[in-house]
Amino acid sequence: MAKAAIYCEEAKRLYVVEGFSLDAIVGMMGKKVSRKTLYNWKIQGEWDAKRKEYLNQTKDLYAELIEIARLMIKEAKANPTSKNVMAAFRAASMLLPKDGTRIIEEETSQEERKGLTAEAIAQIEKEVGLL
C-alpha cells in the first residue's frame, strides 16, 4: 500500500506541476503503474483541477514579478543612481530561469523592450562587472 501511495504522489507531481501526460508518466515510472491506474488516480484526486489551479497561481506570481521589474526599471530610468540601477537589474534577473532563457521577451512588446537607453545598459554592465 505504501508503494502505491509513493507512486501516486510522484505521478500527481509529474502531472500537476511538471505538466506531463499520463502516457509520459507511465514511461517515466518504468511501467510500475498502469495507465488505467494513473487515470483512476487522476479522476479521484481531481488532478486536472489541481493542474489548472497550479498554473493560475504560477501565472499570478509571474505577473507580479514582471510588474515589480517594470517598476524598478522605470525608477532606474527616472533616477539612475547605482542603487536604483542595481535594483532594476536584480528585479529583471528574477525573470530569467536558471538556464538563461529570456522569459520576459514573450510578455513584452518590441516597444516596451526599447525602454532602456544605451547609457542605462552601460551602467548596468558596469555595476555587474561585465565591462
Image: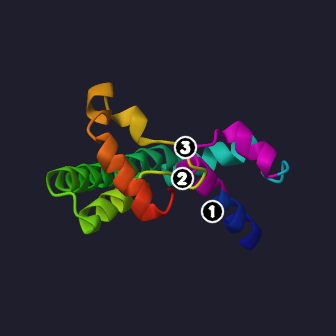
The residue that mark 3 highlights is 101
Mark 3 or 1: the one toward you: 3
Q: Residue at x 59, y 48 (%)?
A: 15
The residue segment tinted magenta is 11-29
Left or right of 47? Residue 83 is left
Instruction: Label 1: state its secondary structure.
Output: helix
Mark 1 is on which residue type? Glu
The residue that mark 2 highlights is 17
Q: Is residue 119 visible?
A: yes
| Horizontal and vertical percent position of residue 38 | 67, 47
Q: CA distance from mark 2 to mark 1?
A: 11 Å
* Sequence-wise first label, 3 or 1: 1
Mark 3 is on which residue type? Thr
The crowd level at tag 1 (other Cα within 10 Å; few <14, some 14-19, many 20+) is few
The crowd level at tag 3 (other Cα within 10 Å; few <14, some 14-19, many 20+) is few
* Sequence-wise first label, 2 or 3: 2
